[in-house]
């Protein structure tokens, strides 16, 4: 899988928040082989220095995707993105512009505005978006080379709550790398997203808040792999009539 | 030989208490005069809640934390043994199910919940009761322990007490986050808290409000005083609390009991806790220096057990369970 020209071997991305400890976070990455770690820096940076924690995240040896979690306007998000670029030395930014405090739903207008500004400024933007086709089009026009549609609102664990919408988004832009981000609670839901042809999944809460985060991370990694294989193998179409896999010749047809 | 302890936070004082109880002469050196806001234990909640902490903490925290309530009571601290009430608002009941799978306790029906803390009755809160837990007022406990140690002959000195600057002899380094200069795997985890006065609200035990985004605990300190805590942010920043953190804490408290809306806001505080990557404490011997550090959010809960293990090492030669590095001798 290539994202902005970078080849990645894993199709699983993990957030780094809410784990019981950094040691368990590191174990989750080790067991899952996740290739990208998202990091939120807004709150940590505001409070002083998150240096020691970021060093631990850097030590994971995976690609870091800083995010603008917690930003409620395009302006805030752009400022945070610039801070992240300096701090982590990467043009990658997962762009979140929250439009609704309770559901953490993205603000489509703020998102497009911030994406346009960041892309023009040389960032490689990963926008956290809904499954809305028109919004997706606008984000691509703004210069985004990857889309990150939600499965369900952040942290809910509801899975893919609008399958039709996600399917149609996937079909509409077959060439654009897409990562289902947010709302996944179970490995089976990640597998489903992969079977639908999404390129990767990103999750945090489902792993971090599991009783055994490292085991759950591994579970997701296996599901992502299984789902991807299922997609690539060109699955059969469901049909109404039972079709026995061995011929009935030699047996009484009406037995 | 006088045992030299650097740092008069909760860890340093517990070490001084255990060593002096075994007849050792002890001097405690601290950068500041007296107990106060310069120690991160000053901002602690004072919950002695090993079972509840076990929701996310590793096993030693639960086991070693069990000794804390008795230890503090034996030091003359006023320890209230009333358990912990874990509560969730109607729409967050899923959090309760999750918590109950990980922490042993008694799941309460509406009637039992309301009977346990009548102040919280009638608003659809549900919860569970974790009986074998206690709480104390950390500031009173620290101040009291200090006075008790001084009366027992422990001397307190003011000074930088940097490791290496003290000539000869053994040094027990309990400086907390300040020891990052020699313990590079120590990090700060910032916590923000508030103290309220709400004389109309009566709670008899700490209440933990479960919430997917804004978890809160409220610890009653008597006389209508309540401590609200605490954020947990990956940062070593010790600067003032942010508006966002305080708004989240206060909103959660208001959701727990609307009466907190009328509370007086007495204090807002922030500091950074010292923690190692697995959030477990460590005892390390390097030459003549012994580090006892990394108590994370478990200062009052774990300092007694660590101090006891350390004293057992120095006095009887029993190497502590949480010792992960042993270079040197005495």
Image (tube, rainbow, N blue to C red):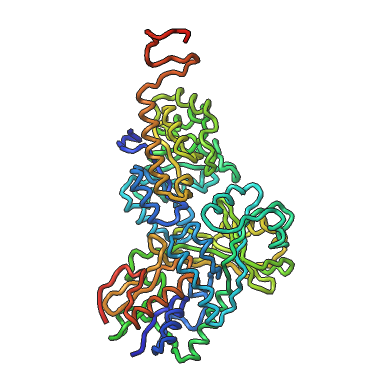
Task: Decide: is B314 above or below A172.
Answer: below
In-image side of B306 versus B53 (left or right): left
**Residue lying at 69% horizontally and 74% vertically, measured from the top left:** B223
Q: Residue A44 at what x, y percent from top left?
A: 46, 56
Q: Say which quarter of the image contains residue A197.
A: top left
Task: Decide: is A15 above or below B24.
Answer: above
Q: Residue A239 at what x, y percent from top left?
A: 47, 16
Nearest the camera: A168 or B76? B76
Image quarter in which the C terminus of chain B is found:
bottom left
Nearest the camera: A210 or A15? A210
In-image side of A227 versus B254 (left or right): left
Q: Residue B232 at what x, y percent from top left?
A: 50, 59
**Residue lying at 37% horizontally and 11% vertically, measured from the top left:** A247
Nearest the camera: A74 or A153? A153
**Residue lying at 38% horizontally and 16% vertically, measured from the top left:** A245
Q: Is residue A148 visible?
A: no
Image quarter in which the N terminus of chain B is found:
bottom left
């Amino acid at each position: 899988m290539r994202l902005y020209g970078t080849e990645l071997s894993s199709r699983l991305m993990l957030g780094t928040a809410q784990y019981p400890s950094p040691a368990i976070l590191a174990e989750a990455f080790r067991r899952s082989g996740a290739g990208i770690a998202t990091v939120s820096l807004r709150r940590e940076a505001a409070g002083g220095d998150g240096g020691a924690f970021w060093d631990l995240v850097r030590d994971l040896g995976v690609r870091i995707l800083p995010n603008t979690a917690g930003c409620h306007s395009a302006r805030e998000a752009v400022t945070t993105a610039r801070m992240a670029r300096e701090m982590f030395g990467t043009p990658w930014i997962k762009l979140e512009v929250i439009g609704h405090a309770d559901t953490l739903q993205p603000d489509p207008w703020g998102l497009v505005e911030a994406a346009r500004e960041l892309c023009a400024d040389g960032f490689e933007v990963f926008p956290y978006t809904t499954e809305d086709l028109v919004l997706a089009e606008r984000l691509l026009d703004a210069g985004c080379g990857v889309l990150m549609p939600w499965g369900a609102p952040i942290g809910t664990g509801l899975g893919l709550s609008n399958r039709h919408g996600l399917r149609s988004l996937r079909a509409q832009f077959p060439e654009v790398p897409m990562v289902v981000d947010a709302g996944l609670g179970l490995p089976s839901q990640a597998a489903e997203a992969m079977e639908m042809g999404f390129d990767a999944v990103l999750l945090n809460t489902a792993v971090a808040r599991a009783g055994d985060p490292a085991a759950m991370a591994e579970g997701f990694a296996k599901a992502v792999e299984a789902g991807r294989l299922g997609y690539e193998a060109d699955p059969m179409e469901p049909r109404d009539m039972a079709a026995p896999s061995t011929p009935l010749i030699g047996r009484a047809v009406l037995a | 030989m006088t045992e030299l302890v650097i740092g008069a936070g909760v860890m340093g004082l517990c070490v001084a208490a255990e060593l002096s109880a075994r007849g050792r002469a002890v001097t405690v050196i601290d950068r500041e005069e007296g107990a106060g806001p310069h120690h991160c234990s000053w901002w602690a909640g004072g919950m002695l809640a090993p079972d509840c902490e076990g929701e996310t903490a590793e096993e030693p925290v639960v086991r070693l934390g069990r000794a804390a309530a008795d230890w503090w009571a034996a030091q003359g601290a006023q320890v209230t043994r009333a358990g912990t009430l874990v509560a969730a608002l109607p729409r967050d009941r899923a959090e309760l199910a999750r918590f109950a799978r990980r922490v042993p306790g008694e799941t309460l029906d509406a009637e039992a919940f309301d009977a346990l803390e009548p102040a919280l009755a009638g608003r659809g809160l549900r919860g569970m009761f974790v009986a074998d837990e206690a709480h104390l007022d950390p500031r009173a406990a620290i101040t009291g322990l200090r006075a008790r140690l001084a009366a027992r002959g422990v001397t307190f000195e003011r000074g930088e007490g940097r490791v290496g600057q003290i000539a000869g002899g053994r040094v027990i380094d309990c400086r907390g986050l300040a020891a990052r200069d020699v313990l590079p795997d120590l990090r700060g985890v910032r916590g923000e808290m508030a103290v309220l006065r709400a004389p109309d609200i009566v709670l008899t035990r700490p209440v933990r409000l479960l919430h997917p985004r804004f978890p809160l605990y409220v610890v009653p300190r008597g006389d209508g005083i309540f401590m609200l805590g605490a954020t947990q942010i990956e940062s070593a920043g010790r600067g003032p609390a942010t508006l966002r953190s305080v708004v989240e804490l206060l909103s959660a408290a208001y959701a727990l009991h609307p009466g907190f809306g009328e509370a007086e806001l007495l204090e807002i505080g922030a500091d950074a806790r010292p923690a190692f990557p697995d959030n477990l404490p460590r005892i390390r011997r390097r030459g003549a220096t012994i580090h006892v550090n990394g108590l994370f959010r478990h200062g009052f809960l774990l300092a007694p057990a660590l101090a006891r293990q350390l004293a057992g090492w120095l006095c009887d030669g029993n190497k502590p369970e949480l010792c992960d590095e042993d270079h040197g001798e005495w």
